[in-house]
Amino acid sequence: MARVIEPAGTPPPSAGTLRPPASPVSPLRLLARRLLMALALLGAAVAVVYFGRDGYRDVTGDRLSLLDALYYATVSLSTTGYGDITPVSPEARLLNVVLITPLRVMFLLVLVGTTLEVLTTAARERSRASRWRKHMNGHTVVIGYGTKGRAATAALCDGGERPERILVIESDPGRADEATRDGLAVVIGDGTRSAVLEHARTSRAARVIVACSRDETSVLATLSVRQLNRTATLTASVRRAENVPLLRSSGADTVIVSAEAAGRLLGVSAVSPATGAVVQDLISPGAGLDLVERPAAPDEAGKPLSSLGELVVAVVRGGAMHLYNDPEVTQVRDGDRLITVQAVSADDEHIDEHDEPRPDRHGRL
């Protein structure tokens, strides 16, 4: 899996709808929790009444049963109070004052709180989205959450990008819901529209990935992104190789031909299954081989690439990439970035969330 390791207002409807990353607690769970709380309060009231049932009088003159206790507790907590069952003894009245009344107040708070929760959900979500947009800067925008968009997002997360720093632009509500469930912020709208891109703070993004399903949509989205952001790293995918020059002239830094790349991998695997397996391993997350881009360490300056103790396949110098056999990069210089192949064990993918990752001398985590 290739990864890069670095050193440590309300918009108009046409701009799309922003969904911040999903809350860790679902609304259904919150509602179930409040329902259980209300039932617990009701159960406590029933127990109090049934325990002191000798101090209550029924209009029929019968002794209070468990059903009568449940009935009295229900009408008391809901403040209905028909008066057919009343506390007559001093002990029963004291229990009403000391226990039933506080239970009634708490029951009403739970009821009113749930109602207010429903009424204020929309306002709270708007406020949450506004706060999220205000602090979003240097993030990653992924246009399209189909197969390519999901795979690209997974690769970003595998490379160390936090999900809350990724924003997806998707016009399909079903895919938007899927991105929200994956913990990503989502803008529901057309990724080719400038208003939608600006709503996603594309002008402040550090990276933009165009993963549209149609080539003409990818070209238009790339043009729109470049009008808003001239400095972001822009990667786009197309299905047909003849559209690569058009995307590059539109402003894409890197263009991936999805159909051709898959076809080449199929052809390589047919001729040499082992070679195909290595290439698949390099672009897949998990244990095995990873392509890692890292800054050259200060003590590596002046050394040949072959003496670094790891396989260096390319060097990025002055914004240009040079393969390992290029005569211009026989030695490492300050400011170089090295693209290396590293072996990753399965244990490296499972770091305890309480452990603080420590960089090595190369700045790798």
Image (cartoon, rainbow, N blue to C red):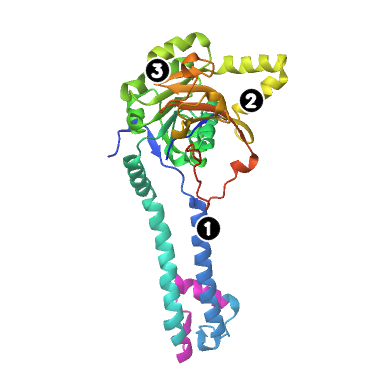
Counting residues from the start of the chain, the first of labels 2 and 1 encountered is 1
Query: From what the image shows, is residue 172 above or below residue 28?
Result: above
Amino acid type shown at disc 3:
Leu
In front here: 259 or 82? 259
Residue that mark 2 sits on: 280
- Say which residue label 3 marks: 220
Q: In this view, does 39 lie above or below 101?
A: above
Q: Distance between the residues labelled 2 and 1?
A: 45 Å
Instruction: Please report whichever mark, 1 or 3, sits nearer to the chain's N-terminal start.
Output: 1
Q: Position of residue 304 (x, y in %)?
A: 52, 24
Q: Is residue 124 magenta?
A: no
Instruction: Looking at the picture, tell me which residue is in the foreground, 56 or 170.
Output: 170
- Gap between marks 3 and 2 measured at Cα: 31 Å
Q: What residue type is disc 1 on?
A: Ala
Work out which quarter of the rendered image holds the N terminus and state it: top right
Compute the Cα span from label 1 to label 3.
Answer: 46 Å
Q: Where is residue 113 in the image (x, y as percent from the top left)?
A: 40, 61
Q: What element carries label 3?
A: helix
Q: Quadrant of residue 340?
A: top right
Q: Which range is magenta?
A: 68-93
